[in-house]
Amino acid sequence: MTVTTLPTRDLTPRIATEIRADKRDLLCGVHAGALRELLERRGVLVFPEIGFTDEEQVAFTETLGALATERRGEQVYNVTLDTAVNKQADYLKGSLYWHIDGTMNEVPIFASLLSSKALPRNGGGDTEFCNTYAAYDEMSDEDKQQLESLRVMHSTWSTLLYYDPEPDIATLRQTMAIGERELPLVWRHRSGRKSLILGCTASHIRGMDLMASTEMLARLRDWATRPEFVYRHKWSAGDLVMWDNTGTMHRARPYDPDSGRMLTRTKLAGEEPFA
C-alpha cells in the first residue's frame, strides 16, 4: 500500500497551516485523519487555489465527518452581503466582529469550510482567525485561576447592537426572541485542552458588576486577538479555508456589499457540547 505524504507549511507559529495536497487525494479521503488532527492542533487549514466546485466541497467535507446542513436543508450556503443573492445577508453583518459560531446551540458546529468564488472588486473582505486554545495556554496562572469558574451570558441581540446600535423595536424583539444562553468562559474540552469562549455574542459575566464585566470581556478579547494568536487570510479565487470552530474565533474584514465578494460555506456537525 502506498502512503501519500501530506505536504504542509505552517503560516504562523501558533495558528494556520497551508496544505498543498492533490485534489483527488483530498476528495477520496486519504488525508482525512491527518487533516482532522492538524485542524485541532493548528486551528486553521488553508488550501490555496484548490478550486473546488460546490459538489466537490460537499464531498470533501463529508470525508472529514458528518455534514451539517443549513436551516432549510441546504448543503452549501452563500456568504455575501448582497441581499439580491442572500436574502438573510443583513444577519451576516455580525460576522464583521470576532465571534464563535453557534454559541446559542447546545452543540456548536465542529468546523466550517469556506471557498472563494468571487473576489471583492474594490478590495477588503479578508478573514481573520485567532487561536483561543493558544490564547488560554499562554495566560498567566493567576488569570487562569480567576477565569476558571466564570459564566458568561451570550445572545444574538448582543451581536445585533454591534452593527445596529439603534434597532427598531420590532427588529430588537425578533432578535431577543431567539433567547440567550449561559456558557463557561473557559471551555474544558474532552481532550483535556482548554479554550476561551468570547466574541460579540457575549453580553456580560454572571454575578459581576457590569462595568467590571465589560472591561474584563474587552481585555480578554484583546488578549486572544493579539497578533501572535492571529492569522489573516487574503483571499485568492479558488482558495478553501477551514477552521476549528471550537478552538478559534473569526471575523471578516469590512468590504462593500456591492463589491461582488462571494464565498460558499459547508459545515461539519458538532461533536462536543460546551462544557
Image (cartoon, rainbow, N blue to C red):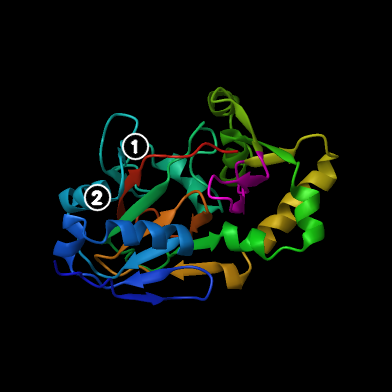
Q: Residue at x 54, y 67 (%)?
A: 230
Residue type at tag 2:
Thr
Q: Outermost residue, front direction?
A: 1
Question: Which residue lies under the disc numbered 2?
Answer: 63
Among the two numbered marks 1 and 2 on one chain, the one whose residue lies closer to the N terminus: 2
What secondary structure prevails in the magenta region?
loop
Which mark is nearer the camera, 1 or 2? 2
Label 2: state its secondary structure.
helix
Residue 99, percent from left and from top: 55, 49
Q: Residue at x 53, y 47 (%)?
A: 100
The quadrant of the picture occupied by the N terminus is bottom left
Label 1: state its secondary structure.
loop
Q: Residue at x 79, y 52 (%)?
A: 145
Residue type at tag 1:
Lys
Residue 164, percent from left and from top: 58, 41
Question: Which residue lies under the disc numbered 1?
Answer: 87
Say which quarter of the image contains residue 134. Answer: bottom right
Q: Which residues are magenta?
A: 184-201
Say which quarter of the image contains residue 25. Answer: bottom left
Left or right relative to 3: residue 69: right
